[in-house]
Image (spheres, rainbow, N blue to C red):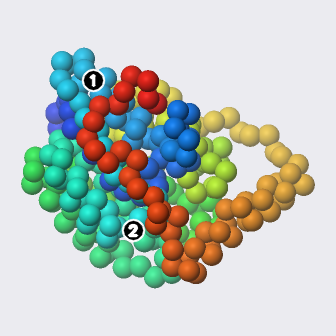
Amino acid sequence: MTGDPAVSTPERVWSRYVAIGDSFTEGMVDPDPDVPDRFVGWADRLARALQGRARAAGRPFGYANLAVRGRKLDDIVGPQLETALAMSPDLVSLVGGGNDLLRPTVDIDALAARLETAVIAIRATGADVLLATPTDTAEAGIFKPLRGRHAIHTANLFTIAGRHGAAVVNLWGLTSIQDWRMWGEDRIHLSSEGHERVTSAALVALGLPPLDPSYAVKLPPAPQGARADELRDHAHWLKVHAAPWVERRLRGTSSGDVIAAKRPTLAPLTDESTP
């Protein structure tokens, strides 16, 4: 499985899906309306769609989400992956390395090597693998300097996928989520609509129909905000989101240090749960 869409057997039905990763896969900042301080996100939405397909085929379905905000790749392809493989999944989404790429120095080739080793381990069990590229930060303000790293990481991910038959959610090419309205207040994590669009992109990568065929269509241009409002919003972001993030980096801590996985065991989504 490579590319977008990218499966050799279209319309496949999966029964045991495990998601591993960091805040992107945990679902920040897409709030769960039923559970305080918990997020939904694209992986939960994807699991909901896959569960519907499994039920329609008369098959059971289980889903676990082991992703935790702030985690670096060593944790994701280490303890998270070990736990995931113990669940005998038939599909694993593996998205990691974003927090490593934010560090002042990073060995991008070493990141790729660790990811490839993880993909090989998953594929050896017979399970399918779903990867996701970073987004293109060309128009992302203070995150623009990351563009070169993101581009190399994206190329490495497509190379790994091509070698081992993995599917790739091509977020680099999904220009519809480059609009700031697709991102949450912290300007780092996707909004609910952003997660919804990524879910459609993930389904397409797996060879399935998207939730919304217009997921890749850009929003109409936003009206130009008043300069005073823009400055006030930026000041709020610096105080509430940017400053704490910098402080944590200086202390060597993470917002996920005391957070556990939100769905640590393989189980079906209940009919009442979101999405």
Amino acid at the residue labelled 1? Arg
Residue with the mark numbered 2: 72
Q: Residue at x 27, y 36 (%)?
A: 267
Residue 4 horizontal/vertical position (percent): 33, 42
Q: Quadrant of the N terminus?
A: top left
Q: Label 1: which residue?
A: 53
Q: Is residue 172 visible?
A: no
Residue at left 19%, top 19%?
57
Name above or below for residue 211 compared with residue 57.
Answer: below
Residue at left offset 52%, top offset 33%: 34
Please tell me in which quadrant of the rendered image residue 60 appears. Answer: top left
15 relative to 22, above or below: above
Residue 129 appears at what percent x and percent y? 23, 48
Q: Which numbered disc flags the more N-terminal residue, 2 or 1?
A: 1
The image shows residue 185 at horizontal and vertical percentages of: 67, 51
Residue 191 visible in the picture: yes
Query: In the picture provided, is 160 more to the left or to the right than 220?
Result: left
Query: Residue 249, percent across and down?
Result: 55, 76
Residue 247, quarter of the rendered image: bottom right
Q: Amino acid at mark 2?
A: Lys
Task: Count neighbours of disc 1 (C-alpha within 10 A) and say few if under 14, some if 14 to 19, many if 20 or more.
Answer: some
Q: Looking at the image, which is closer to me, 95 or 207?
A: 95
- Tell me the quarter of the picture where residue 47 sits: top left
Of residue 132 and residue 176, the one placed in the foreground of this image is 132
The residue tagged with tag 1: helix, strand or loop?
helix
CA–CA distance between discs 2 and 1? 32 Å
**Residue visible at 31% across and 23% down in the picture:** 52
Give residue 62's mark: none
